[in-house]
């Protein structure tokens, strides 16, 4: 049987086994290629520098984030950003033609593990969401005008952006349902629709909006992206939606998640990114590499929570014993340790598949990583809170804030169920159904078929039992 990805499969009794010699075959964990996550000495020095820089410069400053105005925060991180630029580590996720270093995903993953210990570190390194994904999306479809006006300032970190796809009254899990429309009127498009959860929209210099332009096309070719600059008439930001992270007014320094009404909002034709109908293709390209970086940042967050959990377990005693001596606490620590290591290996493996076989071959691995990693992140922080008792729930420790941010990861960027559904469908694809009758591993059937082959070994009396 032909492999769905172009290689060969040998099918035995309905179950599928991969031909290990076929390059690019889908479930790479079945192959015996050497998996190599090592990096050269020069890059290791960069990682060592990053670790010290994040621990000694960014993390201490972040403690005062809530005590500073947005202007002072910008002032505070400007010299740090310059140091990152001087080391050649600014916006490394970008392709070389956009100013990146061409590091590949494994190296980027190792960098993001370090950045993950600190929520503001990606900002200092020029790869914070949603700007990092938006710049990649615009870069794919950008005209020279868009490059100069929007992309280059965004890459330099001079302006910020937002991404607006989700709508309150239609399922964000199925973007073919979006109801926001952009109709062509001469040299302009007129956008009408109702969006929400556009992160950073209130602060952004422009919003990248997905809207239906070609309703008669097949659903995946019906929508396009538009750059809508801040202040455009008809771009009405209704509110920042209160949520677990920003429960009250005044918590929106970092941009919040906005509800937006587009009411006859006109943008020039040159603000359309890519061709009409390219929306879905562009949206998909935007997220995949970023998901590996997210997952490695989650490893960084998990490590931080794990460090705290262990410190507490060896410091606090109750009923004459340290917590570390209690088996239920040992379970929390051991399970967390195993889960973090598995998550790290999954993320690095996804990065390695990307680097060795191309991004499109890593889609299933990345979808697994997304839902599994978000769950591990949530579990490990939850256990660290538990081991700290009441203190874990207070704002005296970073854990409570980490927990709130972790919870959103199971929904943002695609709910767990959507990724699971994608993985299950893809993984099951190479198998052959049993038309009728017993499963392929039905033991009595198999033994009957094999009896002749092994007849000389079978003791008849025993086989009849
Ligand atoms: C913190 C945060 C930031 C976000 N930032 C942005 C942003 O910047 N821009 C933007 O456009 N959007 C953003 N979103 C929105 C996010 O992308 C959507 O919330 C997400 O895609 C789910 O869409 P929905 O909320 O409409 O839920 P629905 O699609 O209505 O799904 C609700 C629930 O139904 C279940 N479900 C859905 N599909 C399936 C399925 N196929 N099988 C089984 N169960 C299913 C899941 O349990 C899911 O959680 C953000 C969300 C959060 C929480």
Image (spheres, helix red, strand yellow):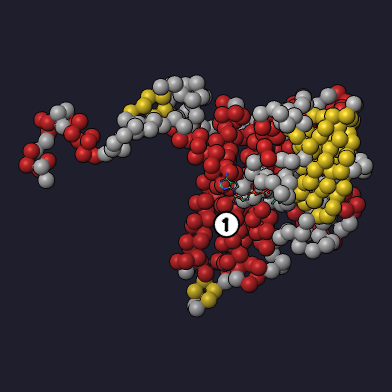
Answer with left or right where residue 261 lies relative to residue 461. right
With respect to residue 196, does 242 lie above or below? below
**Residue found at the very far bottom of the displayed protein:** 319
Report if residue 271 is visible in the image: no
Residue ID for mark 1: 380
Q: Residues within 10 Å of mark 1 (few under 14, many from 20)?
A: many
Q: Position of residue 75 (x, y in %)?
A: 89, 49
Q: Position of residue 312 (x, y in %)?
A: 59, 66
Asked which quadrant contains residue 459, the reply is top left
With respect to residue 195, does 269 lie above or below? above
Residue at the location (47% across, 32% down)?
429
Residue at the location (87% across, 43% down)?
263
Report if residue 347 is visible in the image: yes
Q: Position of residue 36 (x, y in %)?
A: 54, 32
Q: Which quadrant would the N terminus be assigned to in this image?
A: top left
With respect to residue 152, does 396 lie above or below? below
Answer with left or right where residue 90 lies relative to residue 394. right
Answer with left or right where residue 461 lies relative to residue 311. left
Asked which quadrant contains residue 175, the reply is top right
Please tell me whether mark 1 sits on a helix, a strand or a loop.
helix
With respect to residue 5, does 208 lie above or below? below
């Amino acid at each position: 049987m032909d492999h769905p990805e172009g290689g060969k499969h040998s099918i035995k009794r309905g179950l599928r086994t991969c031909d290990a010699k076929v390059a690019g075959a889908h479930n790479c964990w079945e192959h015996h290629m050497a998996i190599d996550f090592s990096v050269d000495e020069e890059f290791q020095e960069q990682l060592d520098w990053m670790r010290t820089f994040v621990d000694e410069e960014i993390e201490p400053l972040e403690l005062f984030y809530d005590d500073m105005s947005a202007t002072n925060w910008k002032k505070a991180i400007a010299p740090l950003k310059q140091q990152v630029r001087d080391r050649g580590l600014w916006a490394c996720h970008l392709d070389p033609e956009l100013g990146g270093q061409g590091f590949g995903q494994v190296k980027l993953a190792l960098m993001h593990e370090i950045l993950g210990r600190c929520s503001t570190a990606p900002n200092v390194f020029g790869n914070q969401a949603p700007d990092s994904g938006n710049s990649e999306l615009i870069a794919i479809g950008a005209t020279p005008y868009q490059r100069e006006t929007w992309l280059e300032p965004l890459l330099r970190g001079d302006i910020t952006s937002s991404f607006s796809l989700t709508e309150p009254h239609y399922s964000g899990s199925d973007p073919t349902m979006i109801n926001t429309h952009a109709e062509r009127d001469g040299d302009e498009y007129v956008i009408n629709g109702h969006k929400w959860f556009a992160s950073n929209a209130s602060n952004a210099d422009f919003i990248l909006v997905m809207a239906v332009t070609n309703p008669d096309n097949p659903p995946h070719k019906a929508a396009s992206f538009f750059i809508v600059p801040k202040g455009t008439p008809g771009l009405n930001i209704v509110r920042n939606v209160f949520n677990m992270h920003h429960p009250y007014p005044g918590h929106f320094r970092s941009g919040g998640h906005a509800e937006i009404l587009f009411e006859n909002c006109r943008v020039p034709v040159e603000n359309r990114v890519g061709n009409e109908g390219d929306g879905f293709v562009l949206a998909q390209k935007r997220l995949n590499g970023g998901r590996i970086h997210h997952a490695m940042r989650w490893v960084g967050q998990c490590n931080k929570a794990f460090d705290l959990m262990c410190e507490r377990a060896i410091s606090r005693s109750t009923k004459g014993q340290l917590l570390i001596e209690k088996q239920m606490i040992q379970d929390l620590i051991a399970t967390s340790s195993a889960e973090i290591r598995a998550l790290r290996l999954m993320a690095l493996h996804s990065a390695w598949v990307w680097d060795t076989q191309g991004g499109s071959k890593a889609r299933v691995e990345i979808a697994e990583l997304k839902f599994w990693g978000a769950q591990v992140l949530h579990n490990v922080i939850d256990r660290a809170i538990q081991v700290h008792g009441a203190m874990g729930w207070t704002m005296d420790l970073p854990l409570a804030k980490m927990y709130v941010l972790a919870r959103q990861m199971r929904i943002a960027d695609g709910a767990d169920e959507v990724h699971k559904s994608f993985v299950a469908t893809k993984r099951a694809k190479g198998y052959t159904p049993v038309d009728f009758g017993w499963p392929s591993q039905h033991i009595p059937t198999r033994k009957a078929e094999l009896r002749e082959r092994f007849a000389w070994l079978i003791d008849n009396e025993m086989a009849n039992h």
